[in-house]
Image (tube, rainbow, N blue to C red):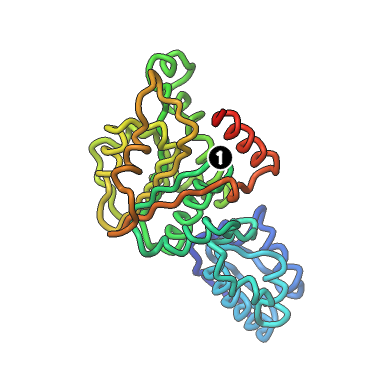
């Protein structure tokens, strides 16, 4: 009998072990002749020397699989333990996949415009993505940002939205400032919660690696080593959007998304997004403009019908 202490070398031990240590429990089942105890990144293994050596070999392969995909699921673990390799080759080689979420679900572009967005992302630093609700503008942008963060290409993700009613109506809402603005930012939280384990997401927000804030909080900042996403940009004024765009720093990308058919600015103020689209009419010099259409809608099938109905009514 031998005893080995192995230090797991991954960037997220909580996700590596699985929800409620499900991955670790599966390893204990597959190596039921070993005593396996984990504390933090340290795993203590006791058993026959050959089996302990085999266990460590498999853990190292699992580390490589985890680093490549950002998650482990039951299928991958069983395949590596029994066959020494993952049998999910087709999934690994799918160039369309942006990343896998913490549940193992592949997040990939689902329409032609989304694929174009993903393909041109490395080549440009400023994006204007317009289109109706449900076309995946913000979701795809956040997925690309999360991937860049996981790959350590950037140091932080900054997500913001204009709080359209940030005047007197916001003041009447109960709670502190965070509680008042969170309803405006909830769609951003929803997308992140679909991609990152809740415990890890909370940690990343608390340490400032992921920042979610109203647009007004961007004033006076220079944003380096980051991906900055402005959602619902159709509800910015000209001054607000100019202020936002001039925050762009070194090793940074900006993604501006919005639906020009849903402008909620008070007093018929002109939209800063529409003005920006007129200023930056053409792609080039690191700027990319993409217009998503109803053909990119990936929500309920009725959403496309709803968009069509409104279009026809407004044309009348």
Is 59 on the left-hand or right-hand side of 221? Answer: right
- Residue 310: percent from left, percent from top: 60, 32
- Residue 182: percent from left, percent from top: 48, 30
Residue at x 69%, y 42% (from the top left corner): 300
Q: Residues within 10 Å of mark 1 (few under 14, many from 20)?
A: many
Q: Secondary structure at mark 1?
A: loop
Q: Is residue 111 above or below residue 193?
A: below
Residue at x 34%, y 54% (from the top left corner): 253
Is 299 on the left-hand or right-hand side of 9? Answer: right
Is 315 on the left-hand or right-hand side of 244? Answer: right
**Quarter of the view holding residue 35:** bottom right
- Residue 94: percent from left, percent from top: 59, 71
Who is closer to the viewer here, 297 or 217? 297
User: Pointer 1: what residue?
Assistant: 133
Residue at x 31%, y 55% (from the top left corner): 252
Who is closer to the viewer here, 220 or 126? 126
Mark yes or no: residue 304 visible: yes
Residue at x 52%, y 56% (from the top left corner): 113
- Residue 230: percent from left, percent from top: 40, 42
**Quarter of the view holding residue 303:** top right
Q: The C terminus lies in which quarter of the figure?
A: top right
Who is closer to the viewer here, 39 or 101? 101
């Amino acid at each position: 009998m031998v005893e080995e202490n192995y230090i797991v070398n991954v960037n997220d031990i909580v996700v590596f072990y699985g929800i409620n240590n499900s991955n670790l429990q599966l390893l204990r089942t597959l190596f039921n002749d070993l005593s396996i105890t984990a504390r933090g990144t340290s795993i203590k293994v006791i058993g026959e020397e050959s089996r302990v050596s085999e266990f460590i070999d498999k853990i190292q392969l699992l580390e490589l699989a985890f680093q490549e995909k950002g998650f482990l699921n039951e299928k991958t673990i069983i395949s590596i333990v029994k066959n020494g390799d993952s049998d999910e080759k087709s999934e690994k080689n799918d160039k369309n996949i942006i990343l896998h979420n913490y549940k193992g679900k592949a997040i990939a572009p689902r329409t032609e415009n989304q694929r174009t967005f993903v393909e041109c992302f490395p080549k440009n630093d400023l994006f204007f993505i317009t289109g109706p609700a449900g076309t995946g503008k913000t979701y795809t942008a956040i997925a690309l940002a999360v991937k860049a963060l996981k790959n350590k290409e950037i140091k932080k993700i900054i997500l913001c939205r204009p709080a359209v009613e940030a005047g007197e109506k916001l003041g009447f809402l109960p709670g502190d400032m965070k509680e008042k603005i969170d309803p405006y930012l909830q769609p951003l939280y929803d997308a992140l919660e679909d991609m990152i384990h809740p415990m890890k997401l909370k940690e990343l927000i608390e340490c400032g690696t992921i920042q979610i804030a109203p647009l007004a909080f961007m004033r006076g900042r220079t944003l380096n080593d980051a991906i900055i996403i402005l959602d619902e940009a159709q509800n910015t004024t000209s001054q607000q959007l100019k202020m936002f765009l001039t925050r762009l720093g070194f090793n940074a990308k900006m993604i501006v998304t919005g639906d020009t058919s849903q402008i909620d600015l008070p007093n018929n103020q002109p939209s800063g997004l529409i003005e920006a689209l007129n200023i930056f009419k053409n792609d080039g010099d690191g700027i990319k403009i993409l217009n998503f259409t109803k053909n990119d809608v990936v929500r309920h099938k009725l959403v496309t019908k709803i968009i069509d109905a409104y279009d026809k009514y407004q044309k009348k």
